[in-house]
């Protein structure tokens, strides 16, 4: 897979000044990411950005997230619209695996989202919490956590959960998305799942503590957490609705559906498939990605990203990550779609974090 791969993924030490200082240091990079992401929207929608930003701000202020103050400060300091909207966008599609490699728990994931620029602008931030340091695969101005590695403790990621449908007709899928969003906006006050994952990284000393927090803390929307600890057998998938959970230990691989079908829950689709993909085809797509990643084989700490291939690689793939908390290794690569007819290609050099002492 060849493309422009000259971009180096930066490693930013955000321990001293936190996400606010990180955002200020990366203001130009945050603005470039926002502008590139907005190209996905039609021009009339882009003109509504301030209104959408205010809506996200209103909801996040009413949530029980401990990080709202950080978003307030970042939005005020950066001085351009889009910060609140970015931090309200926790609906990410992905494929992720957690299991043992050479007797060591290991996590692999792709982050799939239609916005251009996420792969080109991805960064790794070293952050700090009461439980120790951790590495967050992220972007300046974003306060949540989607993919993390806490040396000596655990590695974790989140996937977008399936969509609760009211019918199986593809034309009505946007209606279900809108109705679910309205319900969340109007009635749900729990924190976004990506904020909960960051909270676990900051406060949980080990796999068991992180698992308990991710299982029992109410969340604003359904989500799938993938968790890998440091000892053999410490890996699981936690399938969450707002107030309930199902934890799977044996088949610790997830895409964007429940392992066991549940009524009218439908695996996530987007882009051109939004109005055309059938209910069954959506679930089959997710199952195929899940099974392909489960069959992948690689040695811990020696990832060359050859596993990022169809069906795991899809038109929306933007970031690929492997992480091992036991060996304190982290590998990241960014992807972008060169044209609508092509699959994404690598646009960054592989990022590799050498083994370090657990903090």
Image: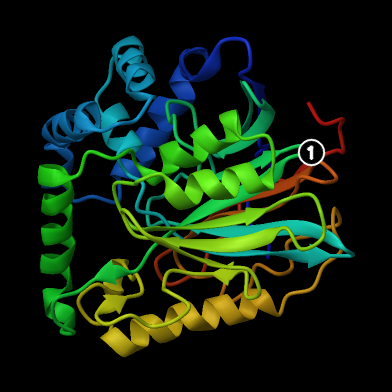
90 lies above or below 18? below
Q: Position of residue 148 (x, y in %)?
A: 61, 42
* Residue 303 in view here: no
- In this picture, residue 292 sits left or right of residue 263: right
Tell me how the rendering is colored: rainbow
Quarter placement of the C terminus: top right
Q: Residue drawn 20% across and 35% down? A: 56
- Looking at the rendered structure, the secondary structure element under dot 1 is loop
Quarter placement of the N terminus: bottom right
- In this picture, residue 131 sits left or right of residue 91: right
Q: Count the numbered circles shown.
A: 1
Q: Residue drawn 61% across and 19% down? A: 14
**Along the line of sight, the residue nearer the viewer: 328 or 172:** 328
**Along the line of sight, the residue nearer the viewer: 36 or 271:** 271
Q: For the residue carrying disc 1, how many other residues have a C-alpha within 10 Å: few (<14), some (14-19), or many (20+)? A: many
Q: Position of residue 199 (x, y in %)?
A: 50, 33
224 lies above or below 44? below
**Along the line of sight, the residue nearer the viewer: 216 or 202:** 216
Q: Position of residue 86 (x, y in %)?
A: 33, 36
116 lies above or below 338? above
Residue where numbered disc 1 is placed: 152
Q: Position of residue 256 (x, y in %)?
A: 43, 69
Which of the 4 image quadrants contains residue 53?
Answer: top left
* Residue 164 in view here: yes
């Amino acid at each position: 897979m060849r493309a422009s791969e000259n971009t180096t993924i930066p490693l930013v030490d955000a321990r001293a000044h936190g996400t606010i200082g990180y955002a200020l240091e990366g203001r130009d990079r945050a603005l470039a990411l926002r502008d590139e992401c907005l190209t996905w929207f039609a021009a009339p929608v882009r003109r509504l950005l301030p209104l959408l930003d205010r809506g996200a701000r209103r909801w996040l202020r009413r949530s029980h997230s401990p990080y709202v103050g950080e978003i307030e400060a970042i939005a005020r300091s950066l001085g351009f619209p889009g910060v609140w909207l970015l931090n309200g966008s926790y609906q990410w599609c992905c494929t992720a695996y957690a299991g043992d490699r050479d007797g060591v728990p290991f996590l692999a994931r792709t982050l799939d989202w239609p916005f251009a620029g996420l792969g080109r602008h991805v960064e790794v931030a070293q952050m700090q919490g009461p439980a120790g340091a951790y590495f967050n695969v992220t972007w300046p101005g974003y306060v949540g956590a989607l993919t993390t590695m806490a040396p000596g403790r655990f590695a974790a990621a989140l996937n977008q959960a399936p969509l609760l449908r009211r019918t199986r007709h593809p034309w009505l899928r946007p209606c279900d998305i809108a109705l679910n969003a309205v319900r969340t906006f109007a009635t749900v006050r729990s924190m976004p799942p990506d904020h909960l994952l960051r909270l676990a990284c900051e406060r949980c000393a080990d796999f068991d503590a992180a698992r308990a927090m991710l299982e029992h803390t109410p969340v604003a929307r359904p989500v799938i957490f993938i968790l890998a600890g440091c000892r053999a057998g410490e890996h699981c998938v936690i399938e969450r609705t707002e107030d309930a959970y199902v934890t799977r230990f044996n088949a610790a691989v997830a895409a964007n559906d429940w392992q066991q079908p549940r009524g009218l829950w439908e695996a996530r689709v987007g882009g051109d498939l939004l109005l055309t993909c059938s209910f069954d085809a959506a679930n089959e797509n997710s199952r195929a990605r899940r099974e392909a990643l489960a069959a992948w084989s690689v040695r811990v700490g020696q990832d060359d990203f050859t596993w990022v291939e169809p069906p795991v690689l899809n038109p929306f793939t933007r970031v690929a990550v492997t992480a091992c908390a036991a060996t304190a290794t982290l590998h990241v690569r960014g992807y972008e779609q060169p044209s609508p007819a092509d699959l994404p290609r690598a646009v960054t050099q592989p990022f590799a974090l050498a083994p370090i002492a657990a903090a």
